[in-house]
Amino acid sequence: MPPMHYLPGKFAMALLIAGGMAIAGCHPQQVPGSTPSGDQSQDNPIAEPSSSEDATPTPIAAVQEIIATPVSVTLDQGEPMPAQLNQALAYGDRVSTEDQALAEVKLVNGPVFRLGGQASLTLRPNQLLLNAGQMITWVEGTLTTPVEIVTPAGIAGIRGTTVFVNIDEDPAAPVEFFAWEGQVAFRLVAGGEEILLNSGEQLFVFPGEQDIDALRQRVQPLDRATALQRLAQSPLLNGFSRPIPTRPELEATVDTLD
C-alpha cells in the first residue's frame, strides 16, 4: 500500500491541472492574424467587416416625368412607394403604373422609356424586364452598351431604335413587338437565332412559342391606318409634356406604310 502523504499530493496536482483548464476556457478564441483586444494600436487597427446593406446602390436611371397616378417604385427590394420626380433608381428597382398613369424614366447609358397601362418593369444590368403593360423605348445620344427588353414571350434588342412593346393583361395573349423606326433584334428567351424587325414591322409572339422559323414568317408591316391612329392617339406618344424626340422618324415610317 502506498504512503499516505502521496494521495494528497496527487489530488492537489489534479486540482491544479483542472483549474488551469478552467481558466484557459474563460478566454475567447483569438482569430489567427488578428490583434488582441488589449493592443488595438493605430498601426494595427481591427477593420470592421463591410456590410452590403450599408453600401448605397449606384444610380443608373432617374424618373423624368410622372403623368397622373398611381406610379410607384420599389427600391432595393423594399415595399412599393409613390414615385417622385427626379427619383434615382438602381439595378433591381422596379417601376409600376396603374390605371391611366404614365411614367418616363431615363437611363444613364442612353435609353429612355415610357410606361403605361398596368405596367411593371424591373431594372437589370443591360436589361429592362417588362412583366406587364405597355412600353415605348428610344435612345437619346449614343447607346454605350447594348440594352434588351425582356418579356415573358421573348427578348427585343435595342439598336438605337424606337420600339413599342405591349403585354396584354390576358397572360395567354401574344406579346406585341413593333419597330417604330430602326431595327429591333428579337430572339426567344431560350436563345438561338434572331429575327430582325425593320421600321414599321411588328411581330406577335405567344408565351412559350419555340419555333423561330414560324415566327419569322409572321413578321409583317403595320398597316398605315393603324400607325396613323397610334401616332395621333397613343398616350405613350402624346400624353407627356414633351414630344418624343424621335417623332420625325416615326412620321417618316408612317409615310412608307400602305
Image (spheres, helix red, strand yellow):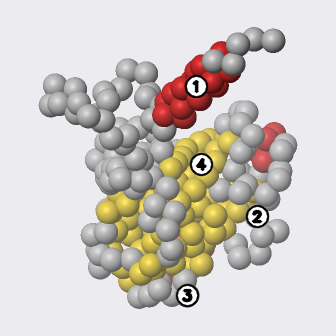
N-terminal-most mark, 3 or 2: 3
Mark 1 crowd level (few <14, some 14–19, many ≥20, 10 Å Cα): few
- Residue closer to the observer: 208 or 96: 96
Q: Which amino acid lies under the numbered mark 2 shown in the image of this protein? A: Pro
N-terminal-most mark, 3 or 1: 1
Mark 3 crowd level (few <14, some 14–19, many ≥20, 10 Å Cα): few
| Residue pictured at 56% horizontal, 52% vertical | 149
Tell us which disc is closer to us: 2 or 1.
1
N-terminal-most mark, 2 or 1: 1
SS category of the residue bearing label 3: loop
SS category of the residue bearing label 2: loop
Label drawn at residue 99: 3
Instruction: Tell me if residue 239 comes above or below residue 23 in the rendering.
Output: below
Q: Which amino acid lies under the numbered mark 4 shown in the image of this protein? A: Ala
Instruction: Tell me if residue 257 comes above or below residue 8 in the rendering.
Output: below
Report the Cα–Cα distance between label 4 and label 2: 14 Å
Report the Cα–Cα distance between label 1 and label 4: 83 Å
What percent of the width, then of the height, locates residue 31?
Answer: 44, 27
Which residue occupies the extreme left position in the image?
42
Tell us which disc is closer to us: 3 or 4.
3
N-terminal-most mark, 4 or 2: 4
Residue indicated by mark 4: 156
Q: Left or right: 39 with respect to 22? A: left
- Residue closer to the observer: 43 or 58: 43
Tell us which disc is closer to us: 1 or 4.
1
Residue indicated by mark 2: 174
Q: Which amino acid lies under the numbered mark 1 shown in the image of this protein? A: Ala
Residue indicated by mark 1: 12
Quadrant of the rendered structure where residue 249 is?
A: bottom left
| Residue pictured at 44% horizontal, 87% vertical | 69
